[in-house]
Image: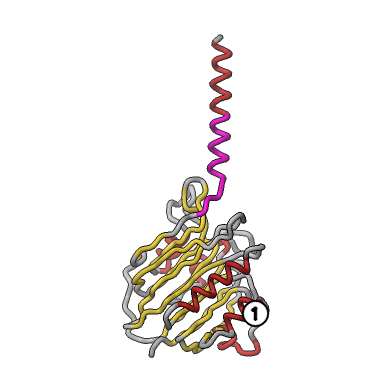
């Protein structure tokens, strides 16, 4: 009788453990959220009107050599005032800080993690913002296509440069059947923002995509890479697009710290 009871208990424990592992492994989309300010180093007020911005898909900090090294990523990001990051991971067993906080602490920048999904009972994966600029308000907006296993969001922030508010949209979308619909929503939202406005992120679409063509053909919209590099600009899927801002210089910076390059621009803010 005891052996049967022990076997039943062991079987029940095994079933419960399997159920727990299965539940933890599921990717669950995060919902909307909003707040004021960011965490980390206190922001400094810019008296000037020029800022250096970048967007970068860090692939979780994994470089071309397959090694994860956030210190190497941080070294590539020094000198920027505003950085939008994609494919940022949450905390790990060895560090209870998410990667946005680790990089923010290293660079002495404010940080904001915008997770797109939860896994293993914590915020596991998403986008992030690093900045030395004051952030008056932020909003995390889910944009995932229903029925697809690709959780995505956009991060809408109001960043202060001197007395000017810049409306910033940062995002990352995938190549899948719902990409055009997600991209259409992102473009529509960006075009509704009051100027000056900035859109940056990994859109996984080049300039021959219909929605990118619509974006670039909209009044007052400037493609920073094309503005900065001219005819030398290669095809790219990461973008910095502005309205009501003047692009002084821009470029694409290759790096071994990720399989994606850094897209950067020097922008002038002012009426």
Disc 1 crowd, CA 10 A, few/some/many (<14, 14-19, 20+):
some
Front one among 28 and 111: 28
In reply to whether residue 257 is colored magenta, the answer given is no
In terms of secondary structure, where does tag 1 sit?
loop
Image x and y of residue 173, in percent: 58, 66
Residue depicted at x 48% and y 46%: 121
Q: Relative to residue 144, is residue 81 drawn left or right?
A: left
Q: How is the image coloured?
A: secondary structure
Position of the C terminus by quadrant: bottom left
Most distant residue in the top direction: 1
Majority secondary structure in the magenta region: helix
Residue depicted at x 45% and y 86%: 244
Residue depicted at x 51% and y 63%: 153
Q: Badge 1 is on which residue?
A: 207
Specify start and end residues of the magenta stretch as a single range: 15-29
Q: Relative to residue 9, is residue 45 drawn left or right?
A: left
Query: Is 45 rendered above or below residue 36?
Result: below
In reply to whether residue 24 is colored magenta, the answer given is yes
Query: Is 155 rendered above or below residue 18?
Result: below
Image x and y of residue 161, in percent: 36, 81
Image x and y of residue 2, in percent: 54, 11
Position of the N terminus by quadrant: top right
């Amino acid at each position: 009788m005891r052996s049967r009871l022990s076997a039943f208990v062991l079987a029940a424990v095994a079933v419960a453990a399997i159920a727990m592992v299965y539940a933890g492994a599921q990717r669950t989309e995060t919902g909307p959220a909003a707040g004021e300010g960011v965490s980390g180093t206190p922001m400094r007020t810019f008296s000037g009107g020029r800022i250096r911005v970048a967007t970068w898909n860090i692939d979780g900090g994994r470089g071309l050599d397959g090694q994860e090294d956030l210190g190497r990523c941080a070294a590539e990001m020094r000198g920027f005032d505003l950085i939008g990051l994609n494919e940022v991971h949450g905390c790990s067993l060895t560090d209870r800080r998410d990667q946005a906080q680790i990089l923010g602490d290293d660079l002495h920048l404010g940080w904001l993690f915008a997770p797109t999904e939860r896994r293993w009972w914590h915020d596991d994966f998403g986008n992030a913002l690093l900045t030395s600029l004051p952030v008056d308000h932020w909003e995390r907006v889910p944009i995932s296509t229903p029925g697809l296993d690709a959780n995505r969001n956009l991060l809408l922030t109001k960043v202060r440069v001197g007395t000017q508010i810049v409306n910033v949209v940062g995002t990352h979308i995938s190549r899948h059947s719902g990409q055009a619909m997600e991209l259409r929503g992102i473009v529509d939202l960006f075009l509704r923002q009051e100027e000056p406005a900035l859109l940056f992120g990994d859109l996984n679409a080049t300039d021959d995509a219909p929605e990118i063509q619509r974006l670039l053909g909209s009044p007052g919209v400037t493609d920073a890479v094309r503005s900065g590099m001219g005819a030398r600009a290669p095809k790219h899927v990461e973008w910095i697009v502005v309205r009501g801002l003047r692009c002084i210089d821009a470029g694409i910076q290759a790096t071994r710290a990720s399989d994606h390059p850094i897209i950067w621009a020097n922008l002038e803010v002012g009426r």
